[in-house]
């Protein structure tokens, strides 16, 4: 039986038993935080979200996250009925209500709101959007590097469900995650529609070959904020970095591999489809990138 490890594995923290959660303007104990069974997010996965990290009282790369949230709202024609400043104020109110200062992960979620009938047409959402903000004490506690398995589930074309959209509709990724778990891995390595290595079910994916850093073209995956920061850090450190197509053959021959995401930052990978990747975790290039990234986080504060 594969031990439960993921890029979102966090240290247990009893304080999370009593966190306060923002629900449509109210901040209530987690036991009282509820949305309607008629909510569009519950019924249809009709919503958008952002995950943010709090370091020393400041949200890392906050402007980029709010930019992406409002871009997503336009893409799905969802009027958030709040300004950027009001969304940030709600996030900060939730943080302060919980007296949180660092090592915090926030999930900020907008849905299309309560529907008058249980069907998909957006016009049936009659209440205005639902906003929920969950802030948890959450410190990464990943005990070992990740093991990945390639799965048949792909990140598809933009005309099906654009993978650049941070939507609540995550079933494709969940099925990929289940397939990886059945194969004895921690997360799924997903290919694009042309068979090139793309992303995992939860994170962006990078390899290191002969001191070069490679990641996908970004055409078929969420172009994550942490992904972009890693590319920026590589350029700052004069590490050659390429967004390009590459195959599983090239991936199996990598010297290092790592995943990127808001929660885990850079998470080493030790095995892909039963092939060992690298010798040290994190490897030397990953370590340099990790240090540069945290310097960037400090600068962003």
Image: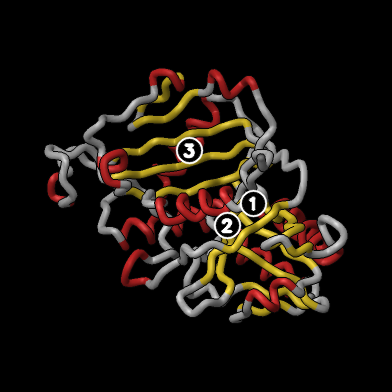
Q: Percent position (x, y) of residue 215?
A: 64, 72
Which residue bears the numbered disc 1?
Answer: 185
Q: Do the residues labelled 2 and 1 touch (CB within 8 Å)?
A: yes
Characterize the local packing of mark 3: few (<14), some (14-19) or many (20 or more) Cα atoms within 10 angstroms. many
Calculate the distance from the C-alpha at mark 2 to the C-alpha at mark 1: 7 Å
Residue 125 located left or right of residue 9: left
Q: Nearer the viewer, mark 1 or mark 3?
A: 1
Q: Can residue 56 be seen in this view?
A: no
Q: Residue at x 69, y 73 (%)?
A: 251
The residue nearer to you, when weighing 237 against 259, is 259
91 left or right of 300 in image: left
Residue displayed at 45% across by 22% down: 30
Q: Residues within 10 Å of mark 1 (few under 14, many from 20)?
A: many
Residue identifier under label 3: 91
Q: Nearer the viewer, mark 3 or mark 2?
A: 2
- Image: 240 above or below 187: below
Q: Do the residues labelled 3 and 2 touch (CB within 8 Å)?
A: no
Vertical placement of 211 versus 230: above or below? below
- Camera-nearest residue between 241 and 1: 1
Answer with mark 1 or mark 3, whichever residue precedes in sequence.
Answer: 3
The residue nearer to you, when weighing 59 against 210, is 210
Disc on the earlier residue, 3 or 2: 3
Q: Which mark is residue 188?
A: 2
Secondary structure under tag 2 reads: strand
Q: Quadrant of residue 104?
A: top right
Mark 1 touching mark 3, by CB under 8 A? no
x and y percentages locating residue 128 in the rendered image: 22, 41
Secondary element at tag 3:
helix
Disc number for residue 218:
none
Counting labels gives 3
Residue occupying the point 45% across, 42% down: 108
- Taking the image as shown, residue 252 lies to the left or right of residue 129, namely right
């Amino acid at each position: 039986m594969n031990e439960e490890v993921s890029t979102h594995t966090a240290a247990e923290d009893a304080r999370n038993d009593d966190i306060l959660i923002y629900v449509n303007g109210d901040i209530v104990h987690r036991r009282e935080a509820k949305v309607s069974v008629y909510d569009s997010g519950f019924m249809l996965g009709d919503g958008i979200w952002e995950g943010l990290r709090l370091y020393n009282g400041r949200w890392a790369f906050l402007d980029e996250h709010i930019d992406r949230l409002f871009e997503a709202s336009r893409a799905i024609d969802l009027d958030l009925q709040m300004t950027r400043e009001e969304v940030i104020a709600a996030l900060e109110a939730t943080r302060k209500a919980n007296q949180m200062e660092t090592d915090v992960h926030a999930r900020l979620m907008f849905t299309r709101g309560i529907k008058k009938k249980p069907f998909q047409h957006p016009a049936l959402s009659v209440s205005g959007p639902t906003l929920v903000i969950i802030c948890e004490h959450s410190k990464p506690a990943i005990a070992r590097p990740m093991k990945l398995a390639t799965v048949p589930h792909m990140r598809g074309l933009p005309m099906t469900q654009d993978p650049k959209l941070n939507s609540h509709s995550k079933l494709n990724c969940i099925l990929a995650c289940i397939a990886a778990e059945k194969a004895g891995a921690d997360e799924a390595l997903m290919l694009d529609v042309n068979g090139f290595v793309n992303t995992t079910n939860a994170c962006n994916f990078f390899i290191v070959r002969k001191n070069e850093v490679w990641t996908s073209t970004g055409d078929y995956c969420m172009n994550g904020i942490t992904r972009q920061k890693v590319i920026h850090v590589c350029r700052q450190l004069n590490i050659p970095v390429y967004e390009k197509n590459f195959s599983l053959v090239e991936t199996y021959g990598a010297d290092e591999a790592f995943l990127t995401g808001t929660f885990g930052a850079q998470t080493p990978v030790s095995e892909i489809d039963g092939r060992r990747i690298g010798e040290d975790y994190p490897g030397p290039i990953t370590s340099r990138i990790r240090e540069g990234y945290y310097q960037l986080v400090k600068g962003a504060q």
